């Protein structure tokens, strides 16, 4: 597997659902004391326009300010007062759209991830948005950080055989039936549940 250059801001300046699909197979890299942690994105969720499940639905607040751009930045928030979640901001500045990174396949730094997570089971290290942030040492200090440079970036991955599937989002009370959750078919690192779904190949996503 050959890891390429960081995704440019222009990658994120597109339809949020398309960005969510196209992030499957890309790699999250986190530089911290002692080395670099890497994981391939195997699951995402889009939070797009006119979306009652989105943090931005009721407008900008101090908590969600990073979600309003510019594109290519991290939106990191805390859920249930404990877990952090990593999002990639999309669309034009001021839109308030983003993609939640839900799961990674660990690639590098797994020993350190195991210590962070308290488990040696590689499948559980980064399976779920809270788990991956704990494993990758992604905290609220990275909210608003650029995803094109260190200490946190998302890079292109060459020659990844992708069969991407889509289905309803997980853990949202409203608009849960929108098929805006994407995952790498057959991956053991995707978070549960794994509902029956269809292969997605939207030609309008450019």
Image: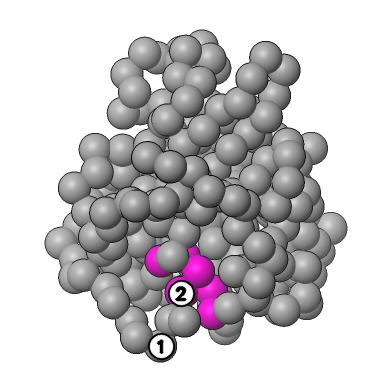
Disc number for residue 18? 2
Q: CA distance from mark 1 to mark 2?
A: 8 Å
Q: Is residue 201 visible?
A: yes
Q: What's the residue at 84%, 58% (across, down)?
A: 62
Q: Please indicate whether residue 31 sits to the left or right of residue 191 in the image.
A: right
Q: Mark 2 or mark 1, which is nearer the start of the sequence?
A: 2
Report the magenta residues as a range. 15-21
> Could you tell me residue 45's position as x and y percent?
45, 61
Position of residue 180 measured from the top left corner of the image (x, y, whole percent):
39, 69
Q: Are marks 1 and 2 in contact (CB under 8 Å)?
A: yes
Q: Is residue 114 above or below residue 49?
A: above
Q: Is residue 117 visible?
A: no
Q: Within 10 Å of the Cα at label 1, are there few (<14), some (14-19), or many (20+) other Cα atoms?
A: few
Q: Which mark is residue 44?
A: none
Residue at image mark 1? 204
Extreme residue in the right direction: 62
Q: Quadrant of residue 2?
A: top left
Q: Residue at x 27, y 73 (%)?
A: 200
**Is label 1 in a helix, a strand or a loop?**
loop
| Badge 2: residue crowd in 10 Å (few <14, some 14–19, many ≥20) | many
């Amino acid at each position: 597997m050959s890891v390429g250059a960081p995704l440019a801001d222009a990658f994120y300046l597109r339809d949020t659902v398309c960005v969510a699909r196209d992030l499957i197979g890309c790699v999250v890299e986190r530089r911290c004391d002692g080395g670099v942690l890497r994981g391939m994105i195997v699951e995402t969720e889009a939070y797009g326009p006119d979306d009652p499940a989105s943090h931005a639905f009721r407008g900008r607040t101090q908590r969600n300010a990073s979600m309003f751009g510019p594109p290519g930045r991290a939106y990191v928030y805390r859920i249930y007062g404990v877990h952090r979640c990593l999002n990639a901001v999309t669309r034009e500045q001021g839109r308030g759209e983003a993609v939640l990174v839900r799961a990674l396949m660990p690639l590098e730094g797994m020993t350190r991830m195991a210590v962070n997570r308290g488990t040696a089971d590689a499948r559980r290290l980064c399976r779920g948005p809270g788990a991956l942030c704990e494993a990758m040492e992604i905290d609220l200090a990275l909210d608003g950080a650029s995803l094109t440079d260190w200490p946190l970036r998302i890079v292109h991955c060459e020659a990844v055989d992708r069969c991407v599937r889509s289905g309803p989002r997980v853990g949202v009370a409203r608009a849960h039936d929108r098929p805006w959750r994407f995952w790498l078919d057959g991956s053991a690192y995707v978070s549960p549940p794994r509902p029956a779904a269809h292969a997605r190949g939207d030609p309008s996503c450019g």
